[in-house]
Amino acid sequence: MTSPHLRPAYHIAPRRGRLNDPNGVFLSDDALHVHYQYDPVFPDTPKRTGWGYSRIPTGGERAWRPQEGRSVLEPAEPYDRHGCYSGCAVPLPGGGVELFYTGNLKEGGRRLPSQNRVLLSGEPGSPESYRRDPANPLIDGPAPGYTGHYRDPHITPHPEREGAWRMILGAQRADGTGTAVLYASGDLRSWDFEGELGCVVAPGAREGESPLMIPEGYMWECPNLLRMVDQEDGREYDVLVLCPQGLDEVEEMLPENPDVFLTHLADPDRCGYLVGHLRGTTLEVTRGFSELDYGHEFYAPQLIAAPGGIGGEAIMLAWMGMPGRDDTPTTRDGWVHMLTVPRRVTLRGGRLYQEPLA
């Protein structure tokens, strides 16, 4: 048995089961509401991933100490019976919140993804408050030219269409390379395919903290696309956060010391960001790919706009874990993985800066 001191005080973690990606994060009623990928039967029975929920108070004596998590959304429909995968929350202008997720279905050796909506009524965290839209699936498969690796919707107000919404999805092309695609909707129910997100290097673009200007890999997971104001030049930029899988490790000589080499992208599952300007479906990259966190376990972050934040600030949580790494000491107690503490994220000089939100 592991020692009780391994239980975290400031991180969301399951009492039992497996936790991974944060989903459906939103602020309301002096609390940060956090959904996340949750498999309550891990490791005793076959994988059954749904959504869990935890509430983090933002004031008072227990500020930023999460409440005990619980399961709120489980695979139950024909289109998601092999998993309710990652997604997001959409706070509505008139009040209320809707949740979106990828339904996972496997038939005949094929993965059949769908994008679905959940109407949240009543108290978040109460299972009876979560009602799937009868119109599901809203997007019933990948667009032509893409594989079944087509998931993780992140939705924000559409920057070019007043009153409309934009969805970005992680995707894999038919040739086995990673990318992202964009959809648009006027009502959050009917979605039109806008096209693949093209990334091009803008004239005069600066390198990021890695040798790659634009990553590729075999899959882009958990993309986030949000508009932020750079606090140095006061201009708006589009920030694309993504998790490209399958990148090759790169060694680079330190210019001031030829005997020292830096190792970039040491893990094939990485998380980073691009900064640029979105023109239609093309991101003109002004600063190349940078890793978002240099720790050993940081993946699948979710970013939301910080209400009242100066200069387009964001709030971010991520999974303190990595794909395929469930063998940790806590599995002896029947649970594994945590979420990071919430972080405030700002854009300054083309770089994302982070600090704990506590």
Image (cartoon, rainbow, N blue to C red):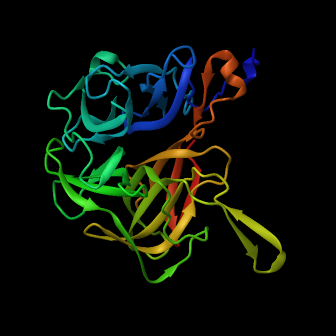
Q: Give how far across and how far down residue 163 sits, in percent.
A: 16, 54
Splitting the image into 4 quarters, where does residue 257 fall?
bottom right
- Number of numbered markers: 0
Please identify the quadrant where the C terminus is shown.
Answer: top right
Could you tell me which residue is drawn at 43 percent across and 58 percent down? 177
Q: Is residue 173 above or below residue 130?
A: below
Q: Residue furthest right?
A: 259
Q: Is residue 157 left or right of residue 19?
A: left
Residue placed most toward the observer, 93 or 340: 340
Could you tell me which residue is drawn at 40 percent across and 53 percent down? 224
Please identify the quadrant where the N terminus is shown.
Answer: top right
Q: Give how far across and how far down residue 327 sits, in percent.
A: 67, 29
Q: Give how far across and how far down residue 38 sits, in percent.
A: 47, 26
Q: Give how far across and how far down residue 116 sits, in percent.
A: 25, 35
Q: Is residue 205 above or below residue 214?
A: below
Q: Is residue 297 above or below residue 43?
A: below
Q: Is residue 85 left or right of residue 296?
A: left
Could you tell me which residue is drawn at 57 percent across and 29 percent down? 65
Could you tell me which residue is drawn at 55 percent across and 25 percent down? 18
Decide if residue 121 is in sight here.
Answer: no
